[in-house]
Amino acid sequence: MNEDTIRLVTIGRIFRRRWRLLAALAVVGALIGYGTSLVVFPPRYTASAPVLLPGQWEERELLTQVDIATSSAVLDRTAAALHWSGVSGRTLQDQVTAKAADGNIIEISGTSDTPARAQRLSDQVAQQFVAFADGVAGGSADSTAASGTAALRKQVADTNRRITELAKAAGSGQTVESVQARTELEQLRTSLEEAMQKLDQADPSNTKAGMVVMGAAPRPTGEAPPTRVQLIAGGALLFFLIALIGHLVAIRMNRRLRTEPEIAAALGSTLLGTVDVPTEQTAHRHKGGGARGRLGRVLGMDARWDMPAPQKSGDQAAGRLRYRRVCARLKERLPGAQKVLVLVPEGDETARRAAGQLAAEAKNGLQLRVAEVSVDRPIVPDRDAESGALVVLSAGSWTAEELAGIAEACADARREVVGIVVAGLVLARPTRSGGQLPDDATLTLAVPGHGTGGSA
């Protein structure tokens, strides 16, 4: 796993080199969101009808009324009143909601596939809720209040008659009997007031059941969430983020070695230098044919996005000087050697071109023979006249295990890895010098001492 910190430049590189793939996946996500809006979440509309509860209500009482508004008793009555085909009280449980608002108001919301049906549903539920609440309050009052009210009224009439009799008997004197009569009269009046209070409390017209529907529900003008636009935008954003996170996870899981010290440690040898390989492409690209290859080129998937963009190359003389310095360092490590085997990992086009140029620049009796080696099952030729093996490869292309396999293959063939050369792509100048080697130089070169090389 790559432990390097993911920087903003990495995200910017993904946007620059994989913007076509990201855009294509966003379009796919938008299409999936559109299909979801047609099949899974068709357009829905919600209308709300407010119901006012007069009087003083506690919060728990309001919550009880909310539960009653969405109960099966109210919804069954609503389904029977609507006369909609295939709609029952159980079906309406997923389409009707209620909540307590400020000011003792309960908002009843109905959801349906058209604005008209949603409006009618919410209005009908509100009406059935009020009728059900009134019926419950009236039923409890009929059994107790009917008999209790008559008895209380009779008690009031008897008390009023007794007060009148006592008032006549007391007279206007100041005797003890008069004082007792007036005291008893006050007690009877107190009893009368208590009886009147009980009568008022037992009156069904003063109960909390007098709910009122505060007008018809307004017809909805827009879809209820999630709307079709939200599903399309959400699908596009989801697929875009998945693609972006996938790239970031891939770069974190990438175990390919990118720096020269890591490559040298994996092969157990010394870095002799780095060389430049001119290219007219702005990024590493993979060649491929068929429909898959064409699709990859259209989406930009044929380009390596996890490598920095190639820098502009210098002049041809500076490039050739790098190769000659590598050859000089190799000659210093093997002063008496005449032939050296140059190993290139199979499929590393950049390293192959660098090895060919390196063989062409070899002088002073040094001959380089280039050979490709498979990284899956590396096999190195047995030692012949060559004094050792020089490994040429590009950075960011191979893992430590693959390079260790090449080193083990060299040890198995009794060849010492005498050095490592790392090749990197650079942007070629618009006009090439006449002495520059073509890209398709021959793979196996044997160069005499004066630096003449073969070509395809």
Image: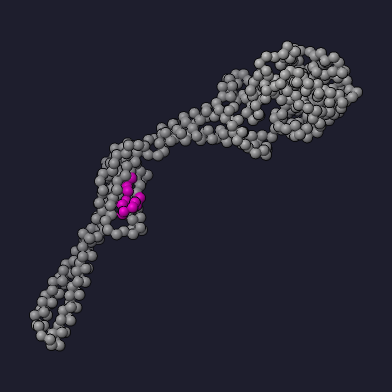
Q: Which residue is painted at 72% across and 26% down in the image?
A: 394
Magenta stretch, overall SS: strand
Residue 128 visible, this orientation: no
**Farthest-out residue, bottom:** 176
Tell me if 131 is positioned left or right of 291 in this view. left
Q: Nearer the viewer, residue 115 or 374?
A: 115
Tell me if 289 is positioned left or right of 137 in this view. right
Q: Which image quadrant for residue 319?
A: top right
Q: Which residues are magenta?
A: 99-109
Q: Position of residue 263 (x, y in %)?
A: 75, 32
Tell me if 290 is positioned left or right of 392 in this view. left
Q: Which residue is painted at 58% across and 24% down in the image?
A: 300
Q: Position of residue 182 (x, y in %)?
A: 15, 81
Q: Position of residue 245 (x, y in %)?
A: 57, 36
Number of marks present in the image shown: 0
Q: Which residue is painted at 72% across and 13% down in the image?
A: 433
Residue 120 is one of the magenta-drawn residues: no
Q: Nearer the viewer, residue 240 or 377?
A: 240
Looking at the image, residue 148 lies above or below residue 429: below
Looking at the image, residue 217 lies above or below residue 59: above
Q: Position of residue 93 (x, y in %)?
A: 36, 46
Q: Which image quadrant for residue 58?
A: bottom left
Q: Which residue is painted at 21% across and 68% down in the image?
A: 197
Quadrant, the C terminus: top right
Looking at the image, residue 245 lies above or below residue 16: below
Quadrant, the N terminus: top right
Residue 110 visible, this orientation: yes
**Farthest-out residue, right:** 336
